[in-house]
Image (cartoon, rainbow, N blue to C red):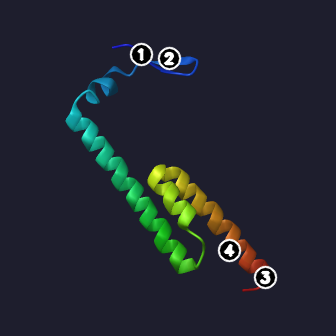
Amino acid sequence: APPLRFGWRSFQIPALQGLLENPASVVLAWTQITFLDFLAARHVLRESLALRIPSKHSVVLCFVVGPAGLLSHLITKLVCLRRRRSQGH
């Protein structure tokens, strides 16, 4: 199998390439990724509702790229909670 190319580097991952040639493995991988993104979005939404902080942007990001949505939520949470403390709420 030809090496995977990322920018100026070249990586050979024959085991992973071989696994992803099987359609059932691809479906399983996508199902798992989608489920993890759903769980991340669920956590973000529930915590945002409990803390009364904005969540739409983070939930959307969770469904597109799970880790980016979680990071967005953590930053939003930090900013909102600090602002509340400084305003005395």
> Which disc is residue 3 wearing?
1
Number of the label disc, if any, that sits on residue 81? 4
Amino acid type for the residue under numbered disc 2 = Ser
Q: Where 24 falls versus 78 (above or below)?
A: above
In three-dimensional space, the C-alpha distance between marks 2 and 1, rounded to whole angstroms, equals: 6 Å
Q: Which residue is mark 3?
A: 87
Q: Measured from the top left, where is residue 70 in percent x and y?
A: 53, 57
Residue located 51% across and 51% down the image: 67
From the top left corner, tell me how far across and down residue 73 is, in percent.
58, 62
Looking at the figure, which quarter contains the C terminus?
bottom right
Up-down relation of residue 1 to residue 84 (above or below): above
Q: Secondary structure at mark 2?
A: strand
Contact check, label 2 and label 1, Cβ < 8 Å: yes
The reply to whether dot 2 and dot 4 touch (C-beta < 8 Å) is no
Q: Residue furthest top?
A: 2
Write down the residue under mark 2.
10
